[in-house]
Image: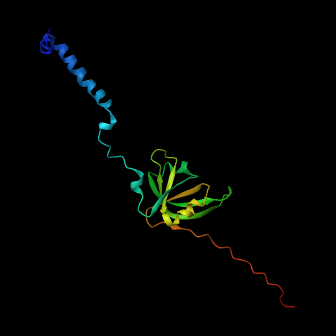
């Protein structure tokens, strides 16, 4: 039985080069089939909870104008949140200077990063929000609804 070395030397020079180039070309294929568990974790992958500061919560919200945000908002941005009421055209401000994060796996979904103590104001509205993009700066500010002045009814009067 011939050994590998004697068979290798028995091949022509062209056959040896063909085998060598085929082995080099197949190397990326074998590397791609290597099991994922043995690879080192990707440094570019960042978990979402690393973006949440202490005392803040990330609340998923439904954004009414998400299609318009696709071209102007990246992974996150500073926005003002407005809620619409019963399909009316007028919008009511809820919060200003809110950090809005785009879902990494589904860019049509968004979440608002708000202080934990004020999260109930976002959660109390079950509908969608209209988002207005702002420049960086300032902190989150919640808008208090304007009080409607009560009309005084005076009974009697000068006779």
Task: State whether residue 23 is above or below residue 75.
Answer: above
* Nearer to us in this view, 18 or 34: 34
* Nearer to us in this view, 79 or 101: 101
Identify the residue at image location x=49%, y=62%: 114
Q: Quadrant of the C terminus?
A: bottom right
* Nearer to us in this view, 72 or 25: 25
Residue 132 x/y as whole percent? 53, 58
Task: State whether residue 155 is above or below residue 148.
Answer: below
Task: State whether residue 58 is above or below residue 108.
Answer: below
Residue 153 x/y as whole percent? 78, 81
Identify the residue at image location x=55%, y=48%: 67
Instruction: Report the number of discs.
Output: 0
Task: State whether residue 27 is above or below residue 53.
Answer: above
Residue 127 x/y as whole percent? 62, 55
Q: Is residue 64 left or right of residue 27?
A: right
Residue furthest to the top in view is: 1
Residue furthest to the right in view is: 159
């Amino acid at each position: 039985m011939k050994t590998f070395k004697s068979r290798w030397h028995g091949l022509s020079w062209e056959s040896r080069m063909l085998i060598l180039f085929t082995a080099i070309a197949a190397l990326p294929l074998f590397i791609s089939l290597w099991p994922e568990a043995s690879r080192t974790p990707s440094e570019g992958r960042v978990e979402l909870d690393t973006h949440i500061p202490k005392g803040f919560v990330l609340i998923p919200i439904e954004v009414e104008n998400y299609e318009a945000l696709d071209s102007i908002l990246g992974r996150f941005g500073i926005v003002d949140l407005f809620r619409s009421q019963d399909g009316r055209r007028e919008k009511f401000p809820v919060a200003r200077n809110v950090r809005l994060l785009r879902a990494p796996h589904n860019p049509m979904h968004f979440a608002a990063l708000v202080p934990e103590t004020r999260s109930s104001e976002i959660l109390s509205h079950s509908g969608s929000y209209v988002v207005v993009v702002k420049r960086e700066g300032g902190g989150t500010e919640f808008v208090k609804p304007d009080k409607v002045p009560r009309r005084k009814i005076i009974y009697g009067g000068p006779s």
